[in-house]
Image (cartoon, grey):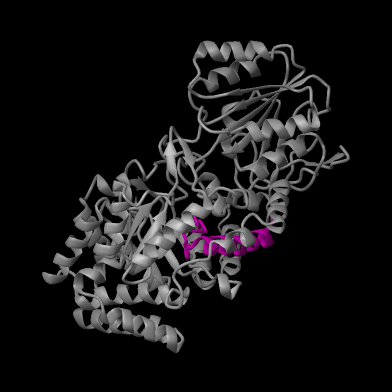
């Protein structure tokens, strides 16, 4: 059944008035006064601009450069409400910002802002997702594999501390999607798993952690509403679709969002995804009033900020220009317009819609006040810049690193081990082949170093997907005399690739290796579903993440230095079910636990 009810003008006006009272009423007097003061300074253009979040890269930029002038224009002249810090993607590899450069850049932007900027970042697995030298928390699925709810809370608190030290007040996390589709090309390890109740528990814990320390409170975001876990399309590349019935949506996708709302999440991010169970038109949830107002606001009773997913993604841009996308999102119930293709065009579109009566001024004010209230709530009315010296006090702390490593260690999952190949023995003739996602960067080098710390004579090779089929044949020949071939594959959600399978000629290499005499131990640093593509691998280990802590955990686990006790938070079709995992003690004594596949 679709949500088609549209409130009357009187009801809409009463709702807007209540919403205007709501965010302000919840603020302390000083913060409320700041919102009212800011509000009085805003023109119609400025009010709309406050709803726009524009992208930046948090890098050191010469003040005379065209790049710097572009940022300066958006902040000083256009008066955008905030910035989101992205990472440069170079040949498929993200080049993260240096923390001091990012903080200095954001300070400079804040000093030029008429109203303090709300700065956001996709810190889904900690600040390390976008910033160098931050604590390397694993991806979300690793927490669920470890069964470490307290770890998710610790990550939320640590991420908040590092974010605020940088000048970031809004974190686009946690991911509340239930990854129920093994072919999902864009969520995957960003999700806590396929069990809705478990996902809700981890989402709630993360939010609690991010809100736990008054001085480092960050705005949290549950995404991607109403649930992006059961799709096989990447919304960066086109309109995705959730084909579930309303009953399935209720049972699978919505529970984590309900949990997030109950936990006090500050914002909900929309999905560029058609949801026929709720919206009869084939349009993204981002521009659906039935989804954002009918389902999220009226049914789930969410009163916080509704932020669109990036409006420059093809799930929207193939349907609407910048002006129309912004207007439709606001009509649907969105408060914040994230990364429109053209910020100034989007602002002009909404301004014209207000002047023409398509969007009421009351409706506009409702969103503006929510944004300003959020700015006051994170302390921007008191101070909008950060002290660079504080970064060294907070960043990459030994305590946070130890906790992140503990999660990564506990997450390591031995899915199968035909022939009792794990643990490996130093000097036993094992070889390591690393399959990196790109020829650029240092991916895989830390893993090799960790392996060699336990087996100094280990033969290793680091390959990239751009290598030819002939290169792969040579690579297979190079390890033909090994007693065991360990293949460590980095396979993450790659928004510019649209899938989560091995790239290039890697599948051909795997066929050569798994058809040879020496058994193969396949290790996935990322996508746990990889095992179904290579059933001839004798053993399979899932780490769920590519970060350094997960690389260290893989080496420790394979050489028997730590217990292996992780449990699958997802079902791998034709391979293993939810909850499976062989328990292997560091003493090299294995036992079968409930749900494990045994030895």
Q: Nearer the viewer, residue 439 or 229?
A: 439
Question: Image point 79% across, 46% down: which residue?
Answer: 593
Whether the magenta-drawn stretch holds residue 175 is answered as yes
53 with respect to 89 (left or right): left
Question: Image point 58% across, 39% down: which residue?
Answer: 526
Question: Image point 38% across, 82% down: which residue?
Answer: 34
In the picture, residue 475 is in which quadrant? top right
Q: Is residue 529 above or below residue 313?
A: above
For the stretch drawn in magenta, the main secondary structure is helix
Residue range of the region highlighted in magenta in the rendering: 148-177
Estimate the x, y position of residue 443 in percent, counting from the top left.
58, 34
In the picture, residue 476 is in which quadrant? top right
- Decide if residue 558 is in sight here: yes
Q: Quadrant of the N terminus?
A: bottom left
Identify the residue at the far left of this view: 356
Q: Quadrant of the C terminus?
A: top right
81 with respect to 168 (left or right): left
Q: Nearer the viewer, residue 346 or 393?
A: 393
């Amino acid at each position: 059944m679709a949500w088609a009810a549209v409130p009357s003008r009187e009801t809409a006006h009463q709702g807007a008035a209540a919403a205007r009272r709501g965010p302000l009423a919840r603020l302390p007097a000083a913060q409320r006064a700041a919102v009212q003061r800011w509000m009085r300074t805003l023109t119609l253009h400025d009010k709309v601009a406050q709803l726009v979040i524009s992208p930046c890269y948090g890098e050191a930029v010469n003040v005379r450069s065209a790049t710097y002038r572009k940022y300066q224009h958006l902040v000083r002249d256009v008066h955008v409400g905030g910035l989101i810090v992205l990472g440069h993607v170079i040949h498929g590899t993200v080049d993260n910002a240096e923390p001091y450069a990012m903080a200095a850049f954001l300070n400079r932007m804040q000093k030029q802002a008429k109203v303090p900027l709300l700065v956001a970042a996709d810190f889904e697995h900690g600040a390390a997702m976008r910033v160098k030298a931050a604590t390397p928390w694993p991806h979300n699925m690793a927490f669920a594999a470890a069964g470490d709810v307290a770890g998710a809370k610790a990550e939320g608190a640590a991420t908040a501390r590092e974010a605020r030290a940088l000048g970031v007040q809004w974190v686009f996390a946690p991911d509340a999607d239930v990854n129920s589709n093994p072919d999902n090309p864009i969520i995957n390890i960003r999700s806590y798993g396929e069990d809705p109740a478990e996902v809700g528990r981890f989402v709630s814990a993360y939010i609690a952690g991010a809100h736990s320390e008054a001085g480092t409170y960050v705005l949290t975001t549950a995404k991607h509403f109403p649930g992006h876990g059961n799709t096989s399309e990447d919304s960066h590349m086109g309109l995705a679709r959730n084909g579930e019935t309303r009953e399935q949506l209720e049972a699978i996708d919505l529970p984590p969002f309900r949990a997030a709302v109950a936990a006090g999440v500050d914002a909900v991010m929309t999905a560029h995804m058609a949801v026929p169970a709720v919206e009869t038109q084939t349009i993204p949830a981002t521009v659906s009033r039935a989804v954002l107002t009918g389902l999220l606001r009226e049914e789930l009773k969410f009163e916080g900020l509704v932020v669109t997913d990036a409006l420059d993604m093809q799930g929207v841009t193939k349907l609407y220009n910048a002006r129309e996308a912004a207007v439709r999102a606001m009509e649907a119930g969105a408060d914040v317009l994230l990364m429109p293709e053209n910020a100034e065009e989007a602002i002009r579109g909404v301004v014209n819609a207000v002047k023409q009566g398509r969007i009421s001024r009351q409706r506009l004010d409702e969103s503006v006040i929510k944004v300003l209230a959020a700015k006051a709530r994170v302390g921007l009315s008191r101070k909008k810049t950060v002290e660079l010296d504080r970064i060294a006090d907070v960043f990459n702390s030994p305590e946070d690193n130890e906790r992140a490593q503990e999660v990564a260690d506990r997450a390591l999952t031995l899915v199968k081990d035909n022939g009792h190949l794990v643990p490996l023995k130093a000097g036993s003739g094992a070889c390591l082949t690393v399959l990196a996602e790109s020829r650029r960067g240092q991916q895989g080098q830390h893993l090799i170093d960790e392996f060699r710390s336990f087996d100094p004579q280990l033969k290793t090779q680091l390959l990239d997907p751009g290598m030819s089929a002939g290169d792969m044949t040579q690579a297979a020949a190079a390890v033909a005399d090994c007693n065991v071939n360990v293949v460590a594959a980095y396979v993450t959600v790659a928004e510019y690739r649209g899938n989560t399978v091995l790239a290039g000629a890697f599948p051909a290499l795997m066929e050569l290796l798994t058809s040879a005499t020496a058994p193969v131990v396949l290790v996935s640093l990322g996508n746990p579903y990889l095992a179904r593509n290579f059933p001839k691998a004798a053993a399979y280990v899932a780490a769920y993440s590519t970060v350094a802590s997960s690389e260290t955990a893989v080496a420790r686990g394979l050489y028997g230095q730590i217990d292996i006790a992780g449990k699958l938070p997802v079902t791998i079709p034709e391979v293993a079910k939810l909850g499976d995992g062989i328990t292997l003690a560091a003493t090299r004594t294995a036992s079968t636990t409930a749900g494990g596949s045994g030895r």
